[in-house]
Image (spheres, rainbow, N blue to C red):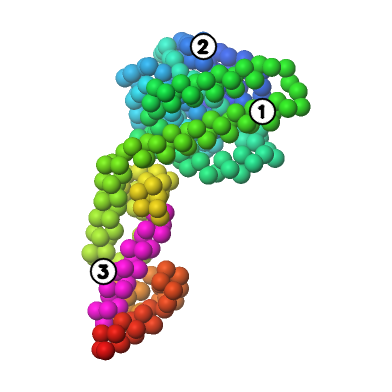
Amino acid sequence: MSKILKVNKPSDYSSWVGQTDPHDLVCVIDYSEVSPVRHSLNNYGVYGLFLQGNEKGMELVYGTGKYDYQEGTLICVAPGQLGGKEDNGEWVHLSGWAVLFHPDVLQGTALEKDIRDFSFFDYRINEALHMTAEERDVMIALIKQLDNELKFPRDSMQNRIIVGFLNILLRYAQRFYNRQFTSRTVLNNDILSRFESLLKEYYENEPAAGVPTVQYCSERLNMSPNYLSDVIRKTTGDTAARYIKQYVIQLAKNRLMSGMNSSEVAYSLGFEYPQHFSRTFKNMTGETPSHYQGRRVAGKIR
């Protein structure tokens, strides 16, 4: 049975690495100051940002997969996720930084709601952020400022300032992810091409077993739903879900023009009910399938 460290609060992890925290809901760890440390496989009940140091060749667990340390990589975890390496008694020297914070520190702030918008918390490790040296310097500078604030005596403004630093860290992480998406044009186009091929392949077998979902497509493409959606949005301007709908509606138009009636088209595309297909078609095109079909046929006759 795996040895799992339950990180229900930041101090559960910082105590493991030998650090005492001045704040009960937030901690900053400079691994160079606490190393060597023992490995731990962590079940997180907190949010965490892990900025990798220069260690190489160390295989760690992230979710259901594994990854190797890469210098400059930022790994983000959220409550309910698993990561690290099972304690085998080995002590290792690490560098880099970690920021862990409990969701309670966000209560009553705008970030409590906004944190749901940071989709990178649900990325897989092969989708982690690989920062440039300049981006890494920015993150480290912000982490050090947060660390200094945590060491100040408590006052009425401290939690607001701490949440402010957390907000800025996450905003910069999002900015750097946006840069990564933009700079990986070839990779993004490859993902889009594979996405389109998957949809085409899916509909080669009729009748389809339901309309494909983002979850289904992401699993077949071996990536997280959030990452697929973000890549498609950056590449096409649409969400992955809308892209699928547009693809399905184009197939529907072709089949309507081939003489199939609305119900036949609906079932062939995987809709459980023709009414659902009609609503989707109208939402996407502004007209019902029968109206579209009649208008196009009348146009042909004329």
Position of 123 compared to 153: left or right?
A: left
Q: Residue at x 51, y 41 (%)?
A: 118
As measured in the structure, the alpha-carbon distance from the residue carrying label 2 to the one carrying label 1 is 26 Å
Given the image, on which type of amino acid does mark 1 rest?
Answer: Ile
Specify start and end residues of the magenta stretch as a single range: 239-259
Give the crowd class for mark 2: few <14, some 14-19, many >=20 residues within 10 Å. Answer: some
User: Counting residues from the N terminus, which is met first, the one under dot 2 or under dot 1?
Assistant: 2
Q: Looking at the picture, which amino acid does disc 2 mark?
A: Val
> Is 167 rendered above or below residue 158?
below
Q: SS class of the residue under badge 2?
A: helix
Quadrant including the N terminus: top left
Q: Which residue is drawn at 64% across and 27% down?
A: 162
Residue 135 % position (x, y)? 43, 26
Q: Residue 34 got which mark?
A: 2
Q: Name the residue under label 3.
A: 206
The secondary structure that most of the magenta stretch takes on is helix
Q: Who comes first in sequence, dot 2 or dot 3?
A: 2
Q: In which quarter of the image is residue 207?
A: bottom left
Q: Which mark is residue 237?
A: none
Q: Does 253 lie within the magenta span? A: yes
Which of the 4 image quadrants contains residue 45?
top right
Q: In this view, does 190 lie to the left or right of 140?
A: left
Q: Residue 161 carries which label?
A: 1
State whether residue 178 appears in this view: yes
User: 256 or 48: which is nearer to us?
Assistant: 256
Q: Are marks 2 and 3 in contact (CB under 8 Å)?
A: no
Mark 3 vs mark 1: which is more N-terminal?
1
Quadrant where the image shows the C terminus: bottom left
